[in-house]
Image (cartoon, rainbow, N blue to C red):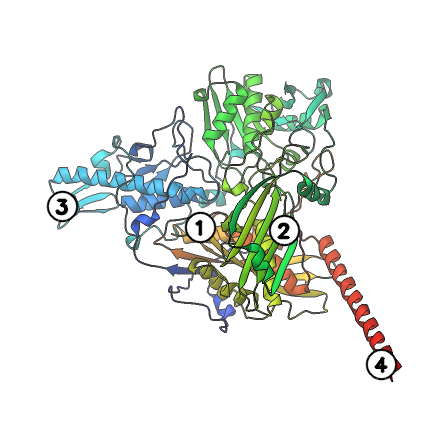
Amino acid sequence: MNRVSSATRLSLSFATRVSSATAFPRREFLKAGGALLIGFTASPRARAQQADLLPGDLAPGPAQPDPDRVDTWIAIHADNSATVFIGHVDLGQGIATTLPQIAAEELDLGMDQVKTVRLETGKGPNQGNTGASSGISRGGPRIRLAAAEARQTLLRMASTRFNVPADRLTVERGVVSVAGSPAQSVTYGQLIGGRRFDVPYTGTAPIKDYRTHKIVGTNVPRIDIPDKASGTYVYMQHVRVPGMLHGRVVRPRGQGSYADGARVTNVDATSIRDIPGARVIRRGDFVGVVAPNEWSAVRAARQLRVAWDLPAALPATPAELFERMRATKTIDRLVLDRGDVATGFASAAHVASGRYDSPYQAHAPFAPSCAVADVKAGSALVMCSSQGVYAARASIAAVLGMPLEKVTVQYYQGSGSFGHACFNDAAQAAAVMSQETGAPVRVQLMRWDEHGWDFYQPAHTADVKIAMDANGKLLAYEYHGWHHTWSQTETTAQLAAGSPATEGDGPRAQALTPFNTGDMYTIPNWRIVNHRVPGLKGYLKGGNLRSPLDVAISFGAEQAIDELAYAANMDPYLFRRQNINGDRWLAVLDAVAKAANWMPRKAAANLSSARIVTGRGIGLGTHLSSYGAAVAEIEVDKQTGVIVAKRMYGALEAGQAINPGIMESQITGMMVQAASRVLKEEVTFSTTNVTSVDWVSYPMLRFAESPEVTAIVIKRQDQRSTGAGEEALASGAAAIANAFFDATGVRLREHPMTPARVLAALAGNRAQRNAAAVFAGNSEDAAASCALKKA
């Protein structure tokens, strides 16, 4: 996989626009390093950088620091350094670097003077779950305002010390000096080092004007990369504690219907008696094994004979899954109803409509989830990779039957986390086994446990209908989407504690929204209907996967937009441009077109009879709050059906860019993941259980197949940061789908776009063309016959 360089950047002013007739020197652009940074500035609005906190971001609870005290967020040490206490976790997205950047900027410290500590319940602030790019978008404002409050307090202390007004003081690297009298200086460490601030967090301290920033907005190197590159970084999978046992869960190779769980009918403990020190752990329908060493635990889990009752409740095929979702009685919600959709469609010059199906998809981290638990009579310590340590503490306490305040959860980064995977399940399993054995237990899931018992991104099926007038302007947009929501009960809780399967319908990400369906376009008549499928009986366990629902939404809606451009005889980029909704969407659209050297032409205008054909596509998409666009250049082998994403260009505007280099890395990852999800990834199942439990049955994009990626970061430093971890992924999936049409003249309305589906679509298109040719030939013969008779 090619790493995007950020060595050279191009800067465009707000007035810079992409002309419809302009060609871009791609060769020269790629020589510049493959990363584009576009800066937009407007009138200064320092307070615009503050985000309102969502309910639950600072949820109250026992044994946690008071979020309304500055000491909860910032500590100053005698050596003139600072510790920033972060309530979100670094999953690999880089907030262990970017949040200290924010603090260092406001405190006038260098990055070498600021550090963070491991998040632990009872010691770190509770900012809720880390997801939906919340580390910066919701964690950033708290850190910024706390640092500003701390700096203001320190300046007041220095003002009293020197008996001068605070506005006469300057600060550099934590050294406070009296302007014009450098001999009068004191360090933060001398003012307060090692002591508490003991002042309230008010959230009203003035923050710096973004135009004065020296650290925020720069490519500070990630603090974790040296250890990761050298192999010395301690991931969760590396954690060991004295006297621990190794554990493995024992389950069917793949989950069944979420509501039904898995019921044990018999366990033969004698089947592992030849493995020294191995023993069976059973609590209810939870079955596991422990042993003094890991290989013995692996052997025991594989060898233990367990009989399971798995009802045949799942649909037999993906096609049956989608039909079941559409046929069931759903909980319908009218998300948006603007204008008069019926009249808009009735007056349209052209309507594009279609059904689009998207499968269950798995998190599939490189290394399976892991946790270590040490449960004693009156306390429990659990080390895990949970994205929300306080929520994990509550669920672990419930499974153990232990008071909440007696449980401590520490965060360790895992091998990859893109949503609700199995990290909490592993934590609960380790806790149960430790409680049963009275010793610390390390549990690491096997590949088939991770793949087979994941919280999958729910399958989605949609009807999309979009209309335009004779001038290519959008008139009406209607989107109906069917999917079930996210499951709430972990497998260990379900099996060990008998906790019933429950589902949620809370966060916006679990449903359709105007922003991720059609906000990018000016639409006078617009209807969105969310059809919630009750997902307990006959469906798999669902959860949030990076950019939840958005890949499915953009895969369908952006193909419909492309169909309209084709019907209007317009270039897909120019068609979008003339229907764009505002400067922020226009900025990412223009930027990605420029980076890709987009030359206007109608899609599928260069069809070829060659075996290997090429195509390009463009798409827009987002998740909750930022703006994403992508261009894909692909090759299609019409003989094998294999699609290869050769190059991808991703543009992202997420308000204030704290660290553009880290954003580039996020964009690169999103484009690669978009290619993997739209081309390869699909959970398969039988009527009883999931069957895609390894890398063969659940293939992902390999390094050699990964596209060359150009990342474009658009900076709006006067705006609040809205998050860069998920918001461009959907546009990448849409761009690949549209590139396939450009290469072949054929639409694929279901993903992943596997070789089998590609060949079927191409064969269907050939049959359709042949039938049309026969019909045309018969018509000509009939016309000739009539002419002869008349003669």
> Cβ–Cβ below 8 Å for labels 4 and 3?
no
The label nearer to you, 1 versus 4, is 4
| Mark closest to the chain's N terminus, 3 or 2 | 3
The relative height of residue 199 versus residue 264 in the rendered view (above or below) is: below
The label nearer to you, 3 versus 1, is 1
Which residue is denoted by mark 3 in the rendering? 183
Q: Secondary structure at mark 2?
A: strand
| Mark closest to the chain's N terminus, 3 or 1 | 3
Residue 781 horizontal/vertical position (percent) = 85, 75
Which residue is denoted by mark 2 in the rendering? 463
Label 4: how many Cα within 10 Å (few below 14, some 14–19, many 20+): few
**At label 2, which amino acid type do we have?**
Asp
Q: Residue furthest left?
A: 163
Residue 322 horizontal/vertical position (percent) = 68, 44
Residue at 62% from the left image edge and 24% from the top image edge:
495
The relative height of residue 306 versus residue 332 in the rendered view (above or below) is: above
CA distance for labels 4 and 3: 108 Å
The label nearer to you, 3 versus 2, is 2
**At label 3, which amino acid type do we have?**
Ala
| Mark closest to the chain's N terminus, 1 or 2 | 2
Which residue is denoted by mark 4 in the rendering? 787
**At label 1, which amino acid type do we have?**
Ile
Q: Secondary structure at mark 4?
A: helix
Q: Name the quarter where the N terminus is drawn.
A: bottom right
CA distance for labels 4 and 2: 46 Å
| Mark closest to the chain's N terminus, 4 or 2 | 2
Residue at 34% from the left image edge and 59% from the top image edge:
41
The relative height of residue 446 versus residue 600 in the rendered view (above or below) is: above
**At label 4, which amino acid type do we have?**
Ala
> Cβ–Cβ below 8 Å for labels 3 and 1?
no
Residue 716 horizontal/vertical position (percent) = 38, 56
> Cβ–Cβ below 8 Å for labels 1 and 2?
no
